[in-house]
Amino acid sequence: MTDVVEVERAGDVAILRFNRPGNLNALSLALARGIAATLIELDHDAGVRGIVLTGAGERAFCAGVDLHEARGMQVADIETWFGTACNVYRQILMTDKPVIAALNGIAAGGGFQIALVSDLRVSHPGARMGQPEINAAIPSIMGSYWMSLHLGWSKNQELSMTGRLMEAREAHELGLINYMVEQDQVLAKACEVAETLAAKPSVAWARTKARFREIALAGFDEAFRAGVLGQQQAYATGEAQAVIEAFLASRGGAKS
């Protein structure tokens, strides 16, 4: 466990908090590794029956990839970099215990994908979510794959190709958010949902989750390979670096 993740207990539920509030809990390499390693620890902890994922602060669950890291990425590093983030998605799916996403704020890109691969999602009306990678000159490939398990082709195309963020109410209407509560109730509701799922008959729960895992992972490797190739091509042209640099400069954040 590292300082980029925090764990607290609420009864039998472990709350795994992404702890980079000053960066909107952006998914850095350190955070991605910390999430994956902590999930493994919690899944093997007999005192934990369910896991809730959330972000530190009130602004963001996870705002996606850390653009300060992304702008300096080299083509040769893409596979390892992308693979580190994708390992978080895989580990959530591989976790046998219930994993609930408590969306305390924006969930974009990699953060959106973390939410999509969680078992269920709790949010409040002020949160937003979506897949904005294309606007940072990064192909929306892994995100479009996870969305294909939740949404129809046309809506997936729209969100992947425009990169727009949905308001929580729209996401709720689409079924992407399972429970909508007031902001100060998000964490408590997520813990309640985790406890409810953890109390299900053990074999029925295990086999149900395992089947969803099998379905989700069936196309994972293909999407990963396509994602690596797409990002390598985007970085080889210099387009991704230029767009990210311009975005950071416009936010006064050209330096990390």
Image: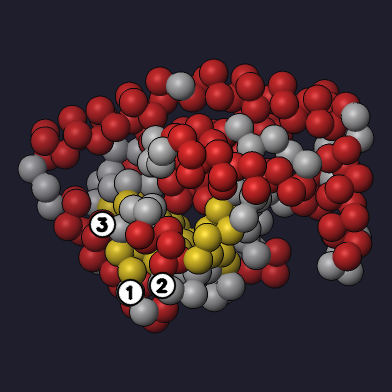
Look at the numbered discs 2 and 3 and tell me whether their residues touch, using CB distance below 8 Å: no
Look at the numbered discs 2 and 1 and tell me whether their residues touch, using CB distance below 8 Å: yes
Is disc 2 surrounded by few (<14), some (14 to 19) or many (20+) residues within 10 Å?
Answer: many
Three-letter code, disc 1: Val
Whichever of labels 2 and 1 marks the residue nearer the N terminus, that label is: 2
Left or right position of 217 against 10: right
Three-letter code, disc 3: Ala
Left or right position of 146 against 150: right
Q: CA distance from mark 3 to mark 1?
A: 15 Å
Residue 187 at least partly seen: no
Q: Determine which residue is flagged by label 1.
A: 181
**Residue at x 91% of width, y 62% of height:** 249
Q: Determine which residue is flagged by label 3.
A: 194
Element on which disc 1 rests:
loop
Q: Position of residue 170 (x, y in %)?
A: 43, 62
Could you say which is closer to the camera, residue 15 or residue 220?
220
**Residue at x 59% of width, y 25% of height:** 224
Q: CA distance from mark 2 to mark 1?
A: 5 Å
Could you say which is closer to the camera, residue 47 or residue 52?
52
User: Considering only vertical position in the picture, is 57 above or below 43?
Assistant: below
Q: Determine which residue is flagged by label 2.
A: 124
Viewer-nearest of discs 2 and 3: 2
**Residue at x 46% of width, y 21% of height:** 219
Whichever of labels 3 and 1 marks the residue nearer the N terminus, that label is: 1
Image quadrant in which you'd find residue 16: bottom left
Three-letter code, disc 2: His
Whichever of labels 2 and 3 marks the residue nearer the N terminus, that label is: 2
Q: Quadrant of the C terminus?
A: bottom right
